Amino acid sequence: MKKILALSFIISSLQLLSAQETTTRKDTLQGGLRPERTCFDVLHYDLNIKINLEEKSIVGYNNISFKVVNATSKIQLDLFANMQVDSIVFNTKKLNYKREFNAVFIDFPSALTPKSEQSLKFYYSGKPIIAKNAPWDGGFTYSKDRNGKPWVAVSCEGIGASLWYPVKDSQSDEPDFGATIKVAVPNGLMNVSNGRFIGSVPLEENGIKNGYTRWDWEVKNPINTYSITVNIGDYVNIHENYKGLDLDYYVLRDNETAARMHFEEVKPMMDCFQSKFGTYPFADDGYKLVETPYLGMEHQSAISYGNKYVNGYLGVDRSETGIGLLFDYITIHESGHEWFGNSITSKDTADMWIHEGFTTYTESVYIECQYGYDKAQQYINGCKLNIENLSPIIGTYGVNKEGSTDMYEKGAILLNTLRHIVNNDDKWWKILLKYSETFRHKIIDTETVVNFFNTETGMNLTPVFNQYLRYAAIPKLELRKNKSNLEFRWKTDEAKFNMPVDVKIKGKKYRLYPSNNWKKTKYSVNKIQDVEILTNDFYINVE
């Protein structure tokens, strides 16, 4: 999800604190991969809950199916400490468990056999955290529509899905066979979750209807745990099939007319993204936009939409070029996450640039599909004004710590720089398509990304990735004149940095190959100012 501009300086300043100052035992329990987590692989979640809107509480269970990887008699699941563990049942018997912060360590009566498939039912209840500034701080948002009816949604990226349901709360493991999400809400309201709607059931207690209806949804594909979602409201459904793909929009009743017109943008977006990144990754689960009382979030196959049916970012062009008002930021950005973040997922939150950098790049890709290369380049370079270069993009591994919010625009402009390093658009788009298809529905890390681009380009791009991702500063190109000849070098944190760069001298384009040592060119110049560095193609400083 996108940062709020007003908060960006505060967030980045906090991220400048050292890992030693900010990392706690609680962080390592949530972000680490200890044996109690790696010993099993989740196969399926079957979540069945009732939400009491007056009490703002949840009661129910998650039936968790898993495959044993290593023999173990203990596993770790997660549920926030403010939530109650009612019981954990395995083979009809209650299991013993121990809680430490938000971790729940569960003991089995005997060791589980490797490769065996098991399941347990985790009963729980409680009042989940209420979001103060959703979706950035995480939790439930309780609101009302203009008719006074309840309108409720959850967001939990970063803070963790275990704030509202028991789960293996790690991006390193998605349920291989998806999930079912069954949510009971007061009659007269609907719950919309991920995947396909498979039916609704009026609930009864002792043979008498209790005023609740359970809405059942099924996800067939692997899914990020933070992507599993709840949306409660007086929704109407707009459905159509576009070139074989089901498109569904769940919007507040009064907004149906506006939504029908505004969401027409989805069709050219799908054409563009599928041509560049491959077929929509979750066709089995369909594509949905669900209106929410907060700005938005990339919930897989049920994207949260709260941009008020205006273009830009709540009507603002974050690039300040005017081009950002040609499209709805939330529709395009959050849908881009279906390929990058939902389909291709980072193993650790420290590598969230794999989600956000690639997805922010999809904004300019959409512009290029619709309006051409020049406008796309103008837009992506306009987005530089949101980059701070105060701390590295990559965060601290193993402690659930993201890196700098520069992972968005700086990550995207890194990709734009790579495009111009490749210097062959036909090859570039083939590489990007192959990347998307190679790692479709996979969990990867930065090393995997770098190795892929090294192989596909035939270049050693490792120093380039390292400089942009692991250091705060961007490369600085230093120029000087030795008599009449131009000399140049890179000044970087990364040793042996050797990225090419394009320049124009007297209107003619040349490619230079600087290193960290001064190099002399054959080009003569009267003054350094005669050299135009193509900084719209390469994200660098020049001195």
Image: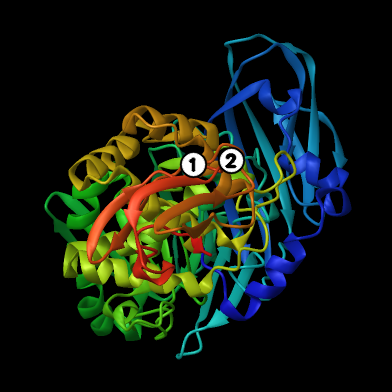
Contact, mark 2 vs mark 1 (Cβ under 8 Å): yes
Residue drawn at x 47%, y 43% as measured from the top left:
180
- Neighbours of disc 1 within 10 Å: few (<14), some (14-19), many (20+): many
Tag 2 residue: 171
Looking at the image, residue 89 sits to the left or right of residue 324; the answer is right
Q: Is residue 433 above or below residue 125?
A: above
Residue drawn at x 14%, y 57% as measured from the top left:
242
Q: Secondary structure at mark 2?
A: loop
Looking at the image, residue 10 sits to the left or right of residue 377; the answer is right
| Mark drawn on residue 345 | 1
Separation of marks 2 and 1 at Cα, in angstroms: 7 Å
299 or 417, which lies in front?
417
Q: Is residue 416 above or below residue 530?
A: above
Residue 205 at what x, y percent from top left? 59, 56
Residue drawn at x 69%, y 68% as measured from the top left:
11
Looking at the image, residue 208 sits to the left or right of residue 146; the answer is right
Q: Amino acid at mark 1?
A: Thr
**Quadrant of the rendered structure where residue 347 is?**
top right
Q: Is residue 199 visible?
A: no
Q: Is residue 238 above or below residue 391?
A: below
- Which comes before the other along the chain, label 2 or label 1? 2
Residue 523 at what x, y percent from top left? 32, 53
Q: Amino acid at mark 2?
A: Gln
Residue 273 at what x, y percent from top left? 25, 53
